[in-house]
Image: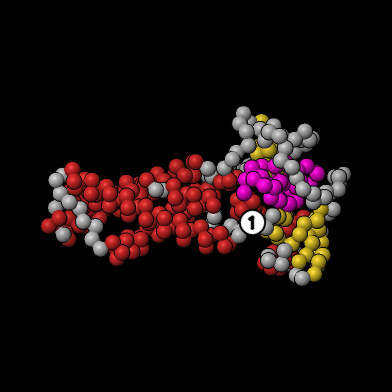
Amino acid sequence: MSGAEPLKAVPVAVPPKGGWADPRPIGYVRQPVGTSGTAAGTSGGGWPVFGYTTALTAAIVAVIDVLNVITRQHDEPQWGLAGPIVWEATSWVALMAFVWIPWIGYRLAPPFARPRWRMLVVHPVGALLFGICHVTAFVLLRKLVYWAAGGNYDFGAVVPNFLYEFSKDWMGYAMLVCGFALFARLMRPATGAQAQGEAMFAIKDGARILRVPVREILAVSSAGNYVEFVLRDGRRPLMRSALSQIETEFTPRGFVRVHRSWLVNRAALTGLRPDGSGDYTVEIGELTVPLSRRFPEALASLKST
């Protein structure tokens, strides 16, 4: 904290677009666009993650469908070749038409991000919606194709057949969500390293990017649709993002979620003060951050620091 002004945990107002008029000793890179509005963009996500995951899913499912057609032709030759091709092709088209449902589920509740209850609410609903849309779409497509060919497609008993299809669709939903998370991790922008080899993080503050050593970030707090980074030199740049996305990226870097609105750098901890009823105050120099009793793992982690 040498030479730094005292830090205080105070409410933050969102600055006007264009950034803060503060000193920039760590260095920054100008970019011609505004603050990114994508939560997943903080960890290399956004549309590239959606695109690559969707393309890979399309290829894998297409291969599986071809194998299914070959298997059906061998085991049930009475159906001929046209029937299995129509069934598998319509299922593929319907699946790809609704990939956006697990994408929204991933964006609302990234795997293992806090609060945990969000995953338990968002993903079951998302999987059910995905299954309903997928089954409804491929049934309608098959009826259309059969009608055009002068035939009639019968889905059969709705409830048992839907449950059979849903037993596959929920796994497809889960695999897509995991695929988005995997690609988001793989596609994180390279943080690079300074001459000392230390890890860096790019903070998109308005129209510029601040490249900051991770060790210089003392804490991160939620500020509406933004997150505020509390830096060791006293600056508090903002970036449009969900705190849960920052948590996903910063947890492996030694940060701990101590409150629904705060992450702290374990390495910067200078003290813990009990406040009664199981709550604590985290002291990082002059900065004080609340530690809620709802985060017992964080308390145990900080006590062991």
Taking the image as shown, residue 260 lies to the left or right of residue 127, namely right
> What is the secondary structure assignment of the residue under circle 1?
helix
What residue is drawn where x is 66% and y is 42%?
239
Residue 31 percent location from the top left of the image: 63, 31
Residue for point 69% across, 50% down: 222
The residue where tag 1 is placed is 251
Residue 208: x and y in percent read 67, 34
**Is 229 inside the magenta-drawn segment?**
yes
- Residue 234 within the segment the image draws in magenta: yes
In which quadrant of the rendered view does residue 157 lie?
A: bottom left
- The quadrant of the picture occupied by the C terminus is bottom right
- Residue at 68% in and 38% down: 205
Q: Is residue 281 left or right of residue 125?
A: right
* Residue 216 in view in this figure: no
Query: What is the x, y in percent for residue 28?
Result: 70, 35
Q: Give the class, few, some or many, for how many residues have Cα within 10 Å of label 1's Cα (few <14, many ≥20).
A: some
Q: How many marks?
A: 1
- The range drawn in magenta is 213-242
